[in-house]
Image (spheres, grey):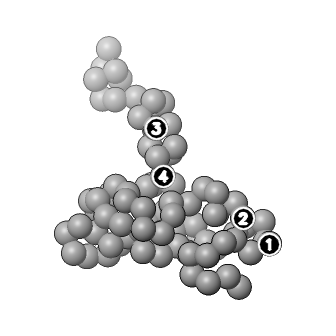
Amino acid sequence: MEPFGGPPSGHPLYVKAHDTMPALGSRVDTPNGPGQVVGRNVPSDKVTVRLNSGGRCSCPSASVCSPRKQHEARYTPSDDSERS
């Protein structure tokens, strides 16, 4: 097994995670507020984030990944568009 945050092992799950999950130390916005990625759990596809407010949270990596947020912003209807 590779060191925490090191290069991916040969297993396809870890190679994909290395390419898609936020890197350790990266700044992200979580449902609980902004923070910094301090851990990654590849099998559960979750990241641990140290929040700027002082706490920690664990959340699905998709909820803090920019591509997912961009997709949701583009394709999720807002309350205003549903009323027209």
Q: CA distance from mark 3 to mark 2?
A: 23 Å
Q: Residue 10 shows which numbered tag?
A: 1
Residue at the disc numbered 4: 65
Q: Is residue 1 above or below residue 69?
A: below
Pointer 1 local density, CA inside 10 Å: few below 14, some 14–19, many at least 20: few
Q: Nearer the viewer, mark 2 or mark 4?
A: 2
Residue depicted at x 45% and y 54%: 63
Q: CA distance from mark 1 to mark 3?
A: 30 Å
**Sequence-first disc among 3 and 4:** 4
Mark 1 secondary-structure assignment: loop
Give the amino acid type for the residue marked by disc 1 in the picture. Answer: Gly
**Sequence-first disc among 2 and 1:** 1
- Please state the horizontal and vertical placement of residue 15, each as a whole percent of the image: 72, 64
The quadrant holding residue 79 is top left
Residue 30 as seen in the image, left or right of residue 6 = left
Q: Are marks 3 and 4 in contact (CB under 8 Å)?
A: no
Residue at the disc numbered 3: 70
**Sequence-first disc among 3 and 2:** 2
**Sequence-first disc among 2 and 4:** 2
Residue depicted at x 71% and y 85%: 1
Give the amino acid type for the residue marked by disc 4 in the picture. Answer: Cys
Residue at the disc numbered 2: 15
Mark 4 secondary-structure assignment: loop
Give the amino acid type for the residue marked by disc 2 in the picture. Answer: Val
The quadrant holding residue 30 is bottom left
Q: Nearer the viewer, mark 4 or mark 1?
A: 1
Give the number of marks.
Answer: 4
Q: Are marks 2 and 1 in contact (CB under 8 Å)?
A: yes
- Please state the horizontal and vertical placement of residue 59, each as a whole percent of the image: 43, 66
